[in-house]
Image (tube, helix red, strand yellow):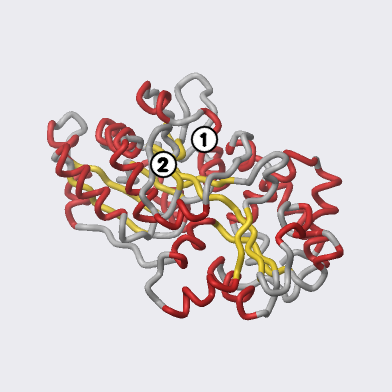
């Protein structure tokens, strides 16, 4: 887990009486988003509202463990996570407070937020990232890797590399495949992917892209924002990598490409719930959505928000799958059992 950063003002804010007017001038944020461009989001929110943001940074798992440990004494107001399965798991653990917000209901598509069980959704997606296939242009034909199914096809034996199957980005993709294909076909597909691997799973998505370019493998999975980041890089080595690889949005003739989300929620014991609501609604605003797209190479979730991001423009439009991301999270436990049975490390 990455080191956390808790400003002294956070503890002071938690000592305020719940009815104090000052409480709405403080927001305690636990964030798994480690992107420098998000600093502009926080500064703009403070400038517009006068609400000071005190932030704790950690990864998704570290944040959820911290919330469990703190219990009802937690000072957290808003939780930002970067995976649908983790958002679903946190909701199931009772770590979020449902939120009724006409602003968010209007701005965020229903499939990109938690299920409303009567008190409002427990979480909302604020940006998406596509799970794309990257291939070596010198050794692989695009038509041989333009569906997820082909990752398990014998024609790609010895060519595939991925990060750990248990990583949330892969678990969410596999949860979507399970929703589309059902258990027997999904497990058979996962076994086929394992059989086609060029080497055991390791590293992150950027490592997979570099492995494809170097010839260590020929085909890999990556989130789209890693691809776009390397496309925009000023490092000549990164540009050289991207000259050697092609990028496919899988299943454009079928169900569409899998998309995961980065999302947020109000913490169950939030001491500043009104500030939390205002912050989440701000994340759905056109200006904040533009930061997600142009600053971190993610896709905006609000209709009508364009992106000036040159890499996203170069990648072009694509057809995304339309299944609810909450369903994907609910499938993660079943998928993990399948991974264990087929030996997907």
- Across and down, in percent, residue 194 comes to 79, 65
Between discs 2 and 1, the one toward the N terminus: 1
From the viewer's side, name the closer residue of 119 and 211: 211
Vertical side of 151 occupied by 100: above or below: above
SS for tag 2? Answer: strand
Residue shown at the point (71%, 54%) measured from the top left: 146
Q: Which residue is mark 1?
A: 112
Q: Quadrant of residue 276?
A: top left
Count neighbours of disc 1 (C-alpha within 10 A) and say few if under 14, some if 14 to 19, many if 20 or more: many
Report the side of 140 relative to 272 (left or right).
Answer: right
Report the side of 90 relative to 132 (left or right).
Answer: left
From the viewer's side, name the closer residue of 265 and 95: 265
SS for tag 1? Answer: helix
- Across and down, in percent, residue 120 comes to 45, 24
Report the side of 93 relative to 145 (left or right).
Answer: left
Q: Quadrant of residue 136?
A: bottom right
Cα–Cα gap, marks 2 and 1: 11 Å
Query: Mark 2, mark 1: which one is toward the viewer?
Result: 1
Report the side of 243 relative to 63 (left or right).
Answer: right
Q: Which residue is mark 2?
A: 264
Residue shown at the point (18%, 29%) measured from the top left: 19
- Across and down, in percent, residue 178 comes to 74, 43
Q: Residue furthest top?
A: 118
- Across and down, in percent, residue 8 comes to 18, 57
From the viewer's side, name the closer residue of 314 and 202: 314
Residue shown at the point (38%, 46%) measured from the top left: 307
Q: Are marks 2 and 1 in contact (CB under 8 Å)?
A: no
Residue shown at the point (70%, 60%) measured from the top left: 142
Instruction: Say which mark, if any, is on residue 274.
Output: none
Count neighbours of disc 2 (C-alpha within 10 A) and say few if under 14, some if 14 to 19, many if 20 or more: many
Vertical side of 43 occupied by 151: above or below: below
Which quadrant does the C terminus fall into? bottom right
């Amino acid at each position: 887990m990455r080191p956390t950063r808790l400003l002294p003002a956070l503890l002071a804010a938690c000592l305020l009486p719940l009815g104090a007017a000052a409480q709405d001038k403080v927001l305690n944020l636990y964030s798994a988003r480690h992107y420098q461009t998000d600093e502009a989001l926080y500064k703009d929110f403070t400038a517009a509202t006068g609400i000071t943001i005190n932030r704790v940074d950690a990864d998704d798992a570290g944040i959820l463990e911290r919330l469990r440990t703190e219990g009802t004494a937690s000072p957290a107001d808003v939780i930002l996570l970067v995976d649908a399965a983790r958002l679903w798991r946190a909701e199931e653990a009772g770590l979020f407070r449902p939120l009724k917000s006409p602003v968010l209901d209007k701005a965020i598509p229903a499939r990109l937020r938690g299920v409303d069980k009567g008190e409002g959704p427990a979480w909302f997606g604020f940006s998406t990232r596509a799970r794309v296939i990257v291939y070596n242009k010198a050794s692989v034909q695009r038509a041989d890797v333009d569906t997820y199914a082909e990752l398990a096809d014998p024609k790609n034996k010895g060519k595939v590399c991925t990060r750990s199957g248990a990583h949330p980005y892969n678990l969410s993709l596999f949860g979507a495949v399970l929703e589309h294909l059902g258990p027997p076909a999904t497990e058979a597909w996962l076994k086929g992917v394992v059989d086609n691997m060029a080497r055991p799973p390791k590293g992150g998505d950027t490592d997979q892209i570099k492995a494809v370019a170097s010839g260590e493998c020929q085909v890999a999975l990556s989130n789209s924002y890693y691809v776009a980041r390397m496309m925009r890089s000023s490092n000549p080595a990164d540009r050289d990598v991207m000259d050697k690889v092609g990028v496919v949005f899988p299943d454009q003739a079928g169900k569409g490409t899998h998309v995961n989300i980065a999302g947020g929620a109000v913490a169950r014991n939030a001491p500043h719930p009104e500030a939390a609501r205002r912050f989440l609604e701000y994340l759905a605003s056109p200006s904040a959505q533009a930061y997600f797209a142009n600053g971190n190479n993610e896709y905006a979730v609000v209709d009508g928000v364009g992106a000036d991001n040159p890499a996203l423009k170069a990648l072009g439009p694509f057809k995304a799958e339309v299944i609810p991301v909450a369903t994907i999270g609910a499938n993660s436990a079943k998928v993990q059992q399948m991974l264990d049975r087929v030996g997907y490390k």
